Every structure is written in C-alpha cells, then in structure tokens.
Image: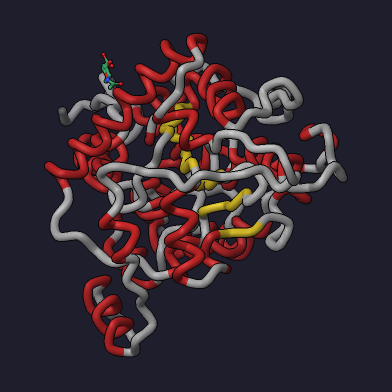
C-alpha cells in the first residue's frame, strides 16, 4: 500500500504510536541544564552543556563564537523554511547515539566521519575496555547494539536527556556527501550488497536496454542513473532513502532537536576538538583523522555534476535544498541551473 508521508504520519497518530515530546520543546529556548554530578562519589564536574553555555574557558571562545553563529543560523533557517512543527516519535531518534557517562548525544550522518565518531563514542562509553579509537575495526563500530541510541529509552528518559545533554551533529556540503556515497556504494566492487539491493533496481528502471549481466549484478550504476533514481517520485514513495543518501534534515531532525554544536566535515579537526574539550576528554582522547577514510579535496561533486543535465541538477538541488539552507552551504558554482 502506498501512502504519502503525511498520510502515514496521520495513520501512526491514530494508532497511538506517537509520543509527544512536549516537555522538551517547552524548555528549548533557554536551556537550563540540570546540575550533573560525576558518577564517582564526592567529585562533581560541569556537564558539557553547562561548559558550552556558561563556558569561561578562554581557549574555547573563538571556536564557540563560530559554533554559536551556526546554531543561530540553523535556528533562523528553521524558522523561515519549515512549516508547522511535526511531532517526533522514538523511532525518529534511531540516529541519535547516547553517551550517558559524558552527557552527550551525537546524531550520526553517514559519509561525514561517522565511523570515527562511533569509534570515539565506543571508547567514551566503554569503561576502559577500549582506549584507542583506531584499534576498533570499522565494521565493529557499526554493529547495532555496541552503542545505545535515544530511541531505546522511554519518553521521560528521552526528554531528560534532550534537556540536559550536549547534542551535536556533523554535516558536510550536501553534494560532496552525495557523490561520496555514490562512489563508495556503487563504484567499489566489494559493495555487492548495495549493488544487489539498489543497483539492480536502478538499472532496471533507469537504463534503456540494459544488458542481462548488469540487470543481475547491478554493479555498474552511473552517477546519472543514480541521480535519476533519487529524483524519481516512486523512489521515496516506496521506501525512505537509504541513510547514506538520506538528507540530514530527515535523519537528524535539526529543526526539532536543537543541536548545541553543529560541526562541519570541512573543519572536522577543530570542530571535533571543540566537542571533545566540551566533554572534558580532550586530554585523554584524540579524534582520529588519519583513519582509512580519505579526505577529499572538497571539489569532487563538480566533476560528477558536469555530466548531469540542468533539468536533473535542479531537481536534485530541490531535493537537498534544506540541507543547503539549514547548514549555510551556498548553491554550488558549478550548477548550470542557478
Ligand atoms: C555562512 O556562510 C558564509 C559564506 O560562506 C560565511 O561567510 C558565514 O560566516 C557563514 N555563517 C555562519 C554563521 O557560519
């Protein structure tokens, strides 16, 4: 059965599966973090949220000013571009990873250093079992159950954490992220699961007169075919986008979850450092930057978009428009339909 998004939401409401996070929303304008005491008796420390909003650490000031700018820009963009406030259910919080020890919530966005952030959070929550993020194999970092997500908690527990924890997210120029996802999932021979699951369907629908082998393997999807698949209205009617190309707006709900820190892939190192120092672990833990994930020159998308017609460029831009607006990414120069 096909139903538009609004219809599904409404149905869900009728079934009573939605939980209103009212308490949380009433307190978002002026965060007043609970006083958080360390688990060790007799010792207390500031929570990361308190450090951020009442911070008096001089060295953090410069970084904080730009973080505050991004926060305010996000808030403004949400006010001007989103319609009526939606309601979140715990299901919507599956991408929010919780660290109860350090009062942190991280929304992971694939293709934005999320493997390394998961590794770091595994170290932070592991009670000493792990000390070096890079010693954790990448696939281990993605095993569901190694980290807790906010969706696993009860509604009061969710609200309490949303109120008092430091919530952070890392974003990236949307088309750079998209091209990175395409390259990783469709041009690497080892990603057979993606080829089978998505590649075969993309070729069936978007390649005129495909060869039998391509139809069976789905292993040679072109970027143009991938773009056609993304903008095809059937795609999202049938199922949500895969998280690797789903918009941050849909994965992390940045207009409803008020993120305290918006980090950027383009400034990954200082931004990661800022989060770790707010969490009070900058002395013991370094964000891995030399891992397997190779940083790109930030200009990869231009090469791929050269071969996309203005018609599809425009459609694709509309699809990812919110991610551009909310996170202050300007419309790429190379788009011919600007
Ligand atoms: C938004 O982007 C512009 C242009 O890149 C930049 O000058 C400005 O500082 C950014 N604003 C914030 C709040 O980050």
Q: Residue furthest bottom?
A: 15
User: Residue at image x 41%, y 33%?
Assistant: 262
Q: Quadrant of the C terminus?
A: top left
Asked if residue 80 can be seen in this view, the reply is yes
User: Residue at image x 47%, y 39%?
Assistant: 168
User: Residue at image x 25%, y 31%?
Assistant: 72
Residue 323 as seen in the image, left or right of residue 47: left
Q: Residue 30 occupies which quadrant of the picture?
A: top left
Residue 188 drawn at (x, y percent)? 66, 42
Q: How many marks?
A: 0
Asked if residue 108 can be seen in this view, the reply is no
User: Residue at image x 70%, y 38%?
Assistant: 43
Residue 215 as seen in the image, left or right of residue 249: right
Q: Quadrant of the N terminus?
A: bottom left
Q: Residue furthest front?
A: 42
Residue 237 drawn at (x, y percent)? 32, 70
- Whereabouts is ligand 1, in terms of quadrant? top left
Residue 309 drawn at (x, y percent)? 26, 36
77 versus 196 height, above or below: above
88 versus 95 height, above or below: below
In this view, the residue in front, 281 or 87, is: 281
Residue 49 drawn at (x, y percent)? 47, 37
């Amino acid at each position: 059965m096909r139903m538009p998004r609004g219809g599904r939401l409404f149905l869900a409401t009728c079934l009573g599966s939605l939980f209103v996070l009212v308490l949380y929303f009433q307190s978002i304008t002026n965060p007043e973090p609970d006083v958080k005491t360390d688990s060790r008796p007799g010792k207390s420390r500031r929570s990361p949220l308190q450090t951020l909003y009442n911070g008096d650490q001089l060295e953090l000031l410069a970084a904080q000013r730009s973080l505050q700018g991004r926060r305010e820009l996000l808030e403004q963009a949400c006010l001007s571009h989103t319609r009526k406030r939606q309601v979140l259910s715990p299901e919507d919080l599956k991408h929010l990873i919780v660290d109860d020890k350090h009062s942190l919530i991280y929304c992971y966005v694939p293709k934005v250093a999320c493997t390394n952030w998961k590794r770091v959070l595994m170290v932070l929550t592991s009670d000493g079992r792990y000390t070096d993020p890079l010693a954790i194999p990448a696939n281990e970092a993605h095993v569901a159950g190694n980290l807790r997500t906010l969706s696993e908690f009860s509604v009061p527990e969710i609200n309490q954490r949303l109120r008092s924890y430091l919530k952070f997210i890392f974003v990236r120029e949307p088309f750079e992220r998209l091209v990175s996802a395409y390259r990783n999932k469709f041009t690497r021979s080892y990603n057979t699961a993606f080829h089978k699951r998505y590649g075969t369907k993309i070729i069936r629908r978007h390649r005129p007169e495909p060869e039998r082998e391509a139809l069976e393997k789905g292993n040679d999807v072109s970027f143009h075919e991938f773009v056609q698949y993304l903008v095809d209205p059937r795609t999202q009617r049938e199922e949500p986008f895969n998280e690797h190309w789903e918009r941050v707006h849909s994965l992390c709900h940045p207009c409803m979850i008020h993120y305290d820190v918006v980090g950027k892939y383009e400034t990954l190192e200082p931004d990661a450092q800022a989060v770790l120092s707010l969490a009070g672990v900058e002395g013991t833990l370094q964000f891995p930057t030399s891992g397997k994930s190779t940083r790109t020159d930030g200009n990869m998308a231009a090469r791929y978009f050269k071969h996309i017609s203005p018609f599809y460029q425009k459609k694709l831009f509309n699809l990812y428009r919110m991610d551009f607006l909310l996170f202050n990414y300007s419309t790429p120069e190379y788009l011919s339909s600007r």
